[in-house]
Image (spheres, rainbow, N blue to C red):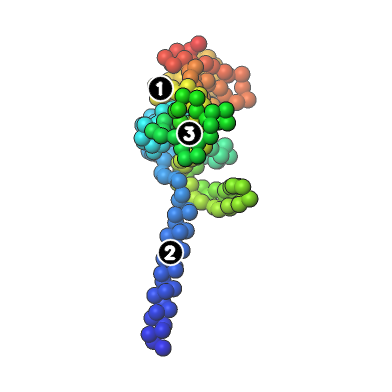
Amino acid sequence: MKKLRTIFFIIGGFFLISYFISFVTTLFVDTTFVPGDARRFDPVGSFAEIRRYAGDGVELLSLEAECVRSDGTIDLKADYVRAAMVPVKYHFVQKLTRPPEEAPPIGAGGSPDGSWYQPINIDVSTPWRSWAVQRQRGTARTNYVYMNLGMKRDLLSVEGGLPSPVIPPPACPFDALWRIALQQGASKEAVAEIDYKPDGYHFSIPDTSTRLHFGLDCQLR
């Protein structure tokens, strides 16, 4: 009897450990910690670390940031940032060295020049927040909950061409754009939306008339 109890505990312990490993893997799937202080996250100053997390050889397509304070940072733990869900989004692309398996033909999503690209999104949000996910693939539906440590990496469907032109890493600190916005009458207590795209930086403060456009050289247009 004692031997049977020992075997039972061993088997039970094995399943418990397996369950715990599976739970932790699901809990932290595709997430990592935000670089630096989450109370003072700098979307431009943290770019090098964000790009490393995205993967080797990635290039930037766009950057979208909300709730940017006048010092160029975001308080990711603030209630108003939490309500914004995903205040910072980086859109990258990675050129593949070979076509994906079962690549579609030209005319059905295939690549006219044989180039294939993997879009990669990095979302930055409030650390230690749980997210519920529903995914549908054919008739199969998957539901799960995970804990986001602050940054999430998503691989999108491979595309047979660039979805938009690649752009250089952001070179204009957001506090520098804010200084010009303040000269234009923006409120220092407000928070701004700043989008970095192929034509430069689009600065706006929701619910106000503040709308500014800066070129890639950081100059007001």
Please give the name of the residue rendered at 42% of the width and 14% of the height, measured from the top-left corner. 217
State yes or no: discs 3 and 2 in contact (Cβ < 8 Å). Answer: no
Kindly give the residue lying farthest to the front in the view shown: 105
> Which quadrant of the rendered structure holds the N terminus?
bottom left
**Which residue corresponds to mark 3?**
119
Amino acid on which disc 1 is placed: Pro
Residue 88 drawn at (x, y percent): 50, 33
Q: How many marks?
A: 3
Query: Could you classify mark 3 by the number of other residues whose Cα lies within 10 Å: few (under 14), some (14-19), or many (20 or more)?
Result: many
| Residue 43 shows in this picture | no
Please give the name of the residue rendered at 41% of the width and 71% of the height, measured from the top-left corner. 13
> Is tag 2's residue or tag 1's residue first in the polypeptide sequence?
2
> Is tag 3's residue or tag 2's residue first in the polypeptide sequence?
2
Quadrant assignment, res 55: top left
Query: Could you classify mark 1 by the number of other residues whose Cα lies within 10 Å: few (under 14), some (14-19), or many (20 or more)?
Result: few
**Which residue corresponds to mark 1?**
168
Query: Could you classify mark 2 by the number of other residues whose Cα lies within 10 Å: few (under 14), some (14-19), or many (20 or more)?
Result: few
Residue 200 drawn at (x, y percent): 48, 18
